[in-house]
Amino acid sequence: MLSADVTRYLSLRRALGYKLIKAERHLLAFARFASERGESHVRAATVLTWLPTAAKTPNSMAHRLTNLIGFARFLHAEDPRHEIPPADIKRPTNRPVPYIYTKCEIARILDTAGNLRLQKPNPLRRELYVTLFGLIAATGLRISEALALRLDDILPDGVLHIRETKFRKSRLVPLHATVMEALQGYLEVRRQRAGESDWLFPSVQHRQLYPTTVNCTFRSLLRRAGIAPERGQPPRIHDLRHTFATRVLEQCGAGRSEVARHFVALSTYLGHVSIHNTYWYLQATPEMMADIAAAAEALVGEKAA
């Protein structure tokens, strides 16, 4: 059964550190579709028949096709009766252009969050969103990492423990003294108003806060703060992470070796498995990209030698 093959394939990939949450949904959906047609092997024709029924946009179809091609290659190596679908759907090549916030814009977002309408079920609303978005802006955390923080992830000496996030990697993130001071102030208010919950940023029900709720609130703050109203695609929370990375690189020294060390350290701090994943954060500073990339790869090569 293809569903059993999906489980086996995902187990092997996850052992390498991949989460594959969406891929699991896509592959199991295809396995059910193929099973309903009485098929126990991957057929290219079946894949191309299934794709338009499972996705509405070319990008979504391309993502599903990518997952299926990897799955089919895995099975084909064991049994040639499994067919590898042709990669004839144009894959998305353009990621969203990051928006780099100014210091003034970040301050306006936090000020606006501090004036959110109070809600009886959520007396912590203002402090929670000021601290959440301020923490992301000051540390470059992913939104998923920030929302997954628990109280015991705040370690002594001003360090955050980021647990098994993307690629199931954990890391320690040191905090600036001013960030730690703001976090301690939030914790004091939280103790008085949040009730019983071990989540750092709890929902009204004292559970982990939903990303959809946070994104909706963030978009509302952008509108009220007048941030980039002319932009067709509004800035994202993730752009706070891009902004953090860009500002760190802009503060590097002029020396090539110093820039390389900063870049490699930044890649580790952000939780990237490879410095190649950090190159995307240089798009907003293209004049730095070529030199930093070359210097960083040279430094990594020296360490590996």
Image (tube, rainbow, N blue to C red):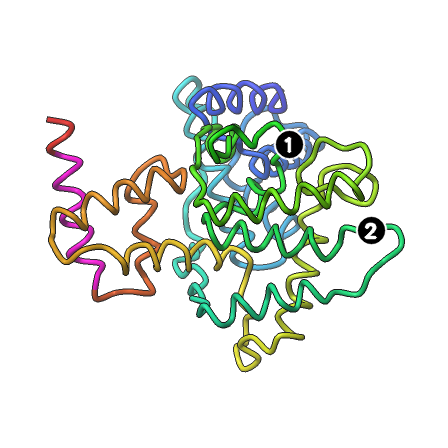
Rendering coords of residue 23 (x, y %): 56, 36
Rendered-image quadrant of the C terminus: top left
Label 2 close to label 1 by CB (< 8 Å): no
Marking on residue 122: 2
Tell me: 190 left or right of 143.
Answer: right
- Taking the spot 71% from the left edge, 31% from the top edge, the residue there is 198
Choose the circle earlier in sequence order: 2 or 1.
Answer: 2
What SS does tag 2 mark?
A: loop
Q: Which amino acid type corresponds to the residue marked 2 in the rendered image?
A: Asn
- Taking the spot 57% from the left edge, 49% from the top edge, the residue there is 182
Considering every residue shown, the one lying at the far bottom of the view is: 230
Q: Which amino acid type corresponds to the residue marked 1 in the rendered image?
A: Leu
Mark 1 Cα within 10 Å, few/some/many (few <14, many 20+)?
Answer: few
Q: Is residue 234 above or below residue 259?
A: below
Which residues are drawn in magenta? 288-301
Considering every residue shown, the one lying at the far right of the view is: 120
Distance from Cα at disc 2 to Cα at disc 1: 19 Å
Rendering coords of residue 119 (x, y %): 85, 58
Total numbered circles: 2
**73 drawn magenta:** no
Rendering coords of residue 53 (x, y %): 66, 50
What residue does disc 1 label? 151
What SS does tag 1 mark?
A: helix
Nearest the viewer among 42 and 71 is 71
Rendered-image quadrant of the N terminus: top right
**289 drawn magenta:** yes
